[in-house]
Amino acid sequence: MLEVLDVSGLVTFQDSGRYGWQSYGVPVSGPMDWFAYRTANSLMDNPPDAVVIEMGLGDTTLRARRDCVLAVTGAGFEVENYVWTFPLWTSFYVRAGWHVRVKKISGGNWAYLAIAGGFETGSVLDSKSTYLRGGLGSAIRTGDILQAGRPSIELSKLAARNFPVGEHMEYSRSPEIEVIPGPQAGGFTKEGIQTFYGGEYRLSTSFDRMGYRLEGKSISHSASDELISEGMTMGSIQITAGGQPIVMMADSPTTGGYPKIANVIRTDLPLLAQCEAGRSKIRFRETTVEEAQEKYRKMIVSLRGR
């Protein structure tokens, strides 16, 4: 269906995630930017948990082996299809033999390429998400042939759809990320808490699908800077012994031993995922569980309406 001609970044298959295996130490994985992932499938009329290609930090060039319709969402990329350039958050028709290039530019880290019918790949532990550290799946390489399923409707009816990027997700180089206080928030000094909520952080160049290391003013502990390892999920913000935050991301370990000062709410994880190393200026703002749940409900309703 699609032949991979060239890859210069990290390209993997991802579905909605691998749930139910955390007690065995297996991360959930899935997309770094779940909103862009869901929207890409929505544009293709695919099931919300269909498999897409996640592209990170580099260019990818593909050649269609038969007519198809694609959609690319995310931030920090642009799309070239045959001789045309298409914006992200749109779907477009690709004829057999045409080349599609998803090119990395500034403004984000991750893009999601969905195909009408979804990509077909092997399932491991009830999911088709790639988890490279655990050897579940493998990165997509030059020369791979990517197979797709049957589209739900005619291709001509799936092309030329669009989703306004500013309607529900406003990616920014100065995002204010909403968080819920973590289980060890009481283990920091008053000054440490003020530093966390009042300070500005930048994403370190040491980041990957497992975690985002942030750099800023040191956050002071009032209790031990380590604890007995306990469960954690994507969005957990650990504070290291040196006082710097690490935000757990899609391939987060299932347990960790640093105190957790807060947890990023689900609706704001995409904003953080698309922050650029050394460029984005990140701030945190406290919210409540009730407000976070309401914000998530509204976002899901808006996605289902498309």
Image: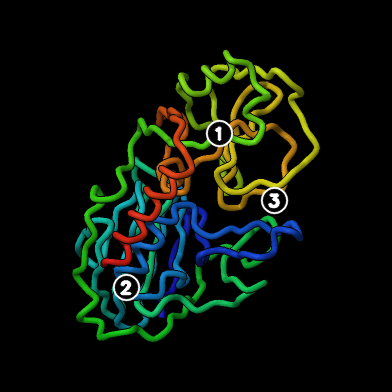
Q: In which quarter of the image is the C terminus?
A: bottom left
Q: Can you tell which of label 1 and label 2 is closer to the viewer?
A: 1
Picture disc at residue 254: 3
As drawn, 94 above or below 77: below
Q: Can residue 16 be seen in this view?
A: yes
Q: Which residue is drawn at 40% across and 52% down?
A: 296
Instruction: Please tell me which residue lies in front, 273 or 22.
Output: 22
Q: Quadrant of the N terminus?
A: bottom left
Return the x and y of residue 152 as percentages of the image width and height: 33, 84
Tag 3: amino acid: Thr
Q: Name the residue under label 2.
A: 44
Distance (Cα) linking label 3 and label 2? 32 Å
Secondary structure under badge 2? loop
Return the x and y of residue 155 as percentages of the image width and height: 25, 82
Secondary structure under badge 3? loop
Q: Which residue is drawn at 43% across and 28% down?
A: 283
Distance (Cα) linking label 1 and label 3? 19 Å
Q: Name the residue under label 1.
A: 181
Q: Earlier in the sequence, mark 1 or mark 2?
A: 2
Q: Which residue is drawn at 42% across and 76% down?
A: 118
Distance (Cα) linking label 1 and label 2? 37 Å
Tag 1: amino acid: Pro
Mark 2 surroundings within 10 Å by alpha-carbon count, few (fewer than 14), some (14 through 19), many (20 or more) = many
Q: Report which quarter residue 304 is drawn in.
A: bottom left
Q: Which residue is drawn at 71% across and 33% down?
A: 258
As drawn, 231 above or below 261: below
Return the x and y of residue 16 as percentages of the image width and height: 51, 65
Q: Can residue 101 be seen in this view?
A: no
